[in-house]
């Protein structure tokens, strides 16, 4: 069974530029999460989807972050414009019940 | 939202010793209690979990104990090995989402 797939693995951009991350969850998993993990800290939930519906986006900085999960499968997370403080690892996870499986993450560096 | 605290934040043990990490949470509705291990530069991976109808679960050298009354659950690693060195996170779900603790960095010295 394929795991959660994320791309790209690494991204370096200049501040004020846009960036997008892509996630393909495990087949059949209705719940999809986007987390941000800063160095030395635990993952912080940004948004949770149940199928195509965003059921918890209270932690998503909506002035610059957006996400979508069309058709309830793949998902993209976008930042526009990026700021220096957005440098982090962005993790996608999916679950069918409560156990979450994580992707490898995208390490974003904003310079 | 859920308040999650882990203790200690760092733990150093000699190979062969035991390690215990404690997680306290606030949401009494939580009924699923997982522990994740994250090695440097890698993704978090579930190592053990427990549901609220069970007080203890063991899987070889690792075990999890749950005290719902006191709202805490603990990870126990026995006969530690250098490959156990990693950051460990608890993540009790509150309101249907996982809230991660800040992690415990475990170092096992050979």
Image: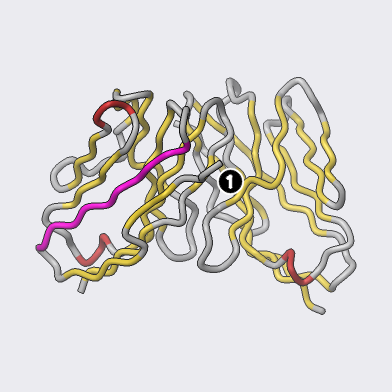
Q: Residue at x 40, y 42 (%)?
A: A45
Q: Please name the residue that numbered disc 1 is placed on.
A: B5
Asked if A18 appears above or below B56 in the picture, the reply is below
Q: Is residue B39 within the magenta segment?
A: no
Q: Position of residue B21 (x, y in %)?
A: 72, 52
Q: Left of B68 or right of it: where is B26?
A: left
Q: Quick one: SS at disc 1? A: strand
Q: Which residues are magenta?
A: A17-26
Asked if B12 appears above or below B74 in the picture, the reply is below
Classify the position of the C terminus of chain B by image quarter: bottom right
Q: Residue at x 65, y 45 (%)?
A: B35
Classify the position of the N terminus of chain B by image quarter: top left
Q: Main secondary structure of the magenta part?
A: strand
Q: Is residue A18 within the magenta segment?
A: yes
Q: Position of residue A5 (x, y in %)?
A: 42, 49
Q: Between A45 and B69, which is closer to the camera in this rendering? A: A45
Q: Between B73 and A73, which is closer to the camera in this rendering? A: A73
Asked if B41 appears above or below A79 in the picture, the reply is below
Q: Left of A56 or right of it: where is B33?
A: right
Q: Between A95 and B107, which is closer to the camera in this rendering? A: A95
Q: Position of residue B89 (x, y in %)?
A: 60, 50
Q: Residue at x 51, y 45 (%)?
A: A3
- Say which chain tag 1 marks: B
């Amino acid at each position: 069974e394929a795991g959660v797939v994320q791309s790209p693995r690494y991204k370096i951009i200049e501040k004020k530029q846009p960036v997008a991350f892509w996630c393909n969850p495990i087949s059949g998993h209705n719940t999809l999460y986007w987390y941000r993990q800063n160095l030395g800290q635990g993952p912080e939930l940004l948004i949770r989807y149940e199928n195509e519906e965003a059921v918890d986006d209270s932690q998503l900085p909506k002035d610059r972050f957006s996400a979508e999960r069309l058709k309830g499968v793949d998902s993209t997370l976008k930042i526009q414009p990026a700021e220096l403080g957005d440098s982090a690892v962005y993790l996608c996870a999916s679950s069918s019940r409560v156990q979450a499986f994580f992707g490898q993450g995208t390490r974003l560096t904003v310079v | 939202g859920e308040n999650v605290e882990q203790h200690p934040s760092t733990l150093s043990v000699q190979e062969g010793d035991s390690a215990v990490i404690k997680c306290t949470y606030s949401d009494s509705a939580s009924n699923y209690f997982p522990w994740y291990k994250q090695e440097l530069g890698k993704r978090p991976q579930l190592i053990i979990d427990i549901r609220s109808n069970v007080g203890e679960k063991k899987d070889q050298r690792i075990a999890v104990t749950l005290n719902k009354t006191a709202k805490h659950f603990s990870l126990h690693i026995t006969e530690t090995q250098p490959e156990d060195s990693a950051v460990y996170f608890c993540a009790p779900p509150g309101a249907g989402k996982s809230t991660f603790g800040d992690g415990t960095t475990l170092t096992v010295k050979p």
